[in-house]
Amino acid sequence: GREPTPIKGFTNLSAMEIDATEDLDKMQRSMEDATGAGHDEDGNSGIQSLMTELTNSIPGIDEAMSFSELMKQVQNLDYDVVVFDTAPTGHTLRLLSFPTILEKAFGKLMDLKDRFGGLIGQASAIFGGGSPDQVQAALLGRLEETRAIINKVNTAFQDPALTTFVCVCIPEFLSIYETERLVQELSKFGIDSHNIVVNQVLFPEKDAEELGEWFDSNKDGLQKEAREICSKMMARKRMQDKYIGQCFDLYGDDFHVVLMPLLDHEVRGVEKLKDFSELLINPIDLEE
């Protein structure tokens, strides 16, 4: 839900779900209430129309503003650690670019104001809004508030004592490539990242050569279906080992790389989550 909810079976774990659209809608409603903006016959307010125009002009501004609403809530939470389960790499990098997006938003608004004079006021009048000054002040004020919050969050993100990124990938080409892209961008933003989790690894304690020797010496005694299954498994294991090797070549000296085994069940429920976390905290020793 929208509020932190204690997880059954734990005394120190809560979770909440983020809905960026709901955050943005709530923010627009508060701005409409503050300015007394009315609605046209289609139900659209002046604020909503201006926000739509701003979003079309500067992609990502809606996400930035909804993220700031979320961060206002997070800053009021009383927890020792807050974990964000972020979206795939492209969305995560957009999150990091929010300060730049907001600077563009301010520039766009000021440019419109300087070049077209009463454009914002005219739009608000058309849609039954409050006074031009009220609408303009509300929008600029909200953007300024958003910028202040995101800059504060960005400062916290860049403090390694407060924030670190844990990259999670699987041993395949595209995932390793996306992880390298993320690591490079995190470095550019000055954000700490020194842990990489490689998930869904087939028999991480064994290598493909070792398993291949076993398969070659035993395949004649296997039924046809079993040989085909083992053959496909060996092909997957060789591919995974290749990309795991690349991962250690790239990050082995500077990062803590953890290999998590492919399980024969989903990680659902308290006990399975605890078992999985044990594997994460005490990973398989590859040197044994």
Image (cartoon, rainbow, N blue to C red):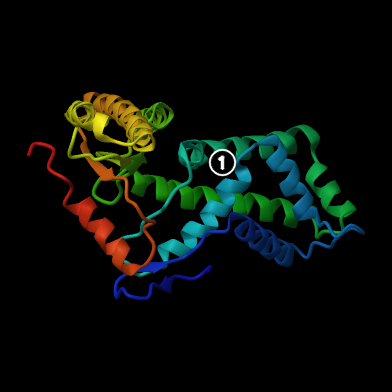
Q: Position of residue 29 (x, y in %)?
A: 70, 64
The residue positioned 67% from the left and 52% from the top of the image is 139
Is residue 212 depicted above or below 267 in this figure? above
Foreground residue among 237 and 189? 237
Q: Position of residue 117 (x, y in %)?
A: 79, 39
| Quadrant position of residue 240 | top left
Q: Which residue is mark 1?
A: 102
Split into 4 quadrants, where in the image is the C terminus?
top left
Q: Secondary structure under badge 1? A: helix
Residue type, label 1: Leu
Q: Is residue 15 visible?
A: yes
Q: Does 135 appear above or below 257?
A: below
Q: Where is residue 257 shown, x and y percent of the image?
A: 22, 38
Q: Residue 145: in sight, yes or no?
A: no
The structure residue drawn at horizontal position 47% and vertical position 48%, both measured from the top left corner, is 150
Label 1 neighbour load within 10 Å: few <14, some 14-19, many 20+:
many
